[in-house]
Image (tube, rainbow, N blue to C red):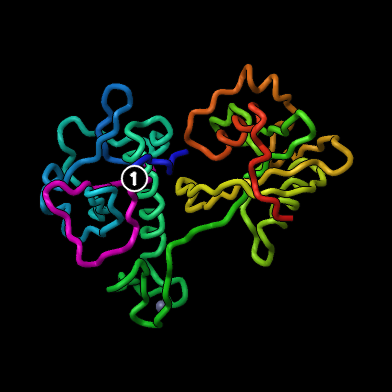
Amino acid sequence: MIQDIGLNRLKNHYDPALRPDADSRMVHFRGRKLLCQLGEGDELTLPTCAQLGAAAGEGSVYLFSIDETTYFLCRAEEVSVPEGFTYEDIAVFRRARPRETAFAAVTAFHLATWYGDNRYCGRCGAPTEHDGAERMLRCPKCGNMIFPKIMPSVIVAVTHGDRLLLTKYANRPGATRFALIAGFTEIGETVEETVHREVMEEVGLKVKNLRYYKSQPWGISGGGLLMGYWCEVDGDDAIHVDHVELDEGAWVSREELRKTYHDTGVSLTGEMIAKFAIGEEHFALRCE
Ligand SMILES: [Zn+2]
């Protein structure tokens, strides 16, 4: 998955003392577009502070480090684009190499979205300031404390014997491939209740035997933290698709998935479908 970056280590502790040096990587977005160099084989390179110039480092915010490389969010409206660099849609993270740079890009996007959305206090409207010690924005006028937004959500693989329920989103450009049931946790419910509710809302099925599998940070959707669950259909297996959210829902056999499904190694959804195809869905915690 995107966050599996092998022996490379993400250090996400906020350190206010860190300032960019010449080799620090600078992350600059224009909306959803990332300033980067995209080489042969989708090799992704982010500009260094030396390439962007010292002015880009001023007012930048320390994001995180991967091994010894520090990453900073450049908050200037415009920067002078170094030769060979372009602005690419952040969706490039799905295919870019090396994996640690792709993960850095999407994690930076999550933080950049949060910083951009919280320049003003939602309580009193005053401009916010960065806290001096931790990753938090503080309102100097009313004391409001704003922490990074992380939204719990579920990915649900509903099984029925040798078949897995796959869905396709409606009204989502580019949604050409099948996915699993997914949705955000609502206020006042447990994650397990989210599983039951989302499956009922999207395809009208009751489920049982919930088992937790793994989680995945998913910063592309504004800050999702996906939690993957396996469960089995309980009773009637007739799918009633909610056409507001979904285009299609279908039971697909293990055999068909083995023939047709290729996991690109990026998403929790992809990994769960691939695990089902090879009959490994039972290695999970039961958590009714
Ligand atoms: Zn305020």
- For label 1, the SS is helix
Residue 21 is a magenta residue = yes
Depicted 59 relative to depicted 267: above or below:
below
Q: Nearer the viewer, residue 212 or 34?
A: 212
Residue 90 is a magenta residue = no
Q: Residue at x 38, y 69 (%)?
A: 120
Residue 206 place in picture, x, y as percent: 82, 46
Residue 126 place in picture, x, y as percent: 37, 75
Question: Tag 1: Cα neighbours inside 10 Å, few (<14), some, or many (≥20)?
Answer: many
Q: Residue at x 73, y 44 (%)?
A: 231
Residue 88 place in picture, x, y as percent: 33, 35
Name the side, left or right, on which 265 lies relative to 84.
right
Q: Would residue 62 be visible to someone looking at this image? A: yes
Name the side, left or right, on which 174 lies relative to 106.
right
Name the side, left or right, on which 201 lies relative to 180.
right
Given the image, on which type of amino acid does mark 1 rest? Ala
Q: Residue at x 34, y 43 (%)?
A: 105
Q: Would residue 170 be visible to someone looking at this image? A: no
Q: Name the image quarter holding residue 143.
A: bottom left
What residue occupies the far top of the structure in this picture?
259
- Magenta residues (range): 9-32
Q: Nearer the viewer, residue 172 or 61?
A: 61
Q: Nearer the viewer, residue 241 or 190?
A: 190
Q: Residue at x 48, y 32 (%)?
A: 265
Mark 1 — residue? 104
- Image quarter for ligand 1: bottom left
Q: Main secondary structure of the magenta part?
A: loop
What residue occupies the far front of the structure in this picture?
283
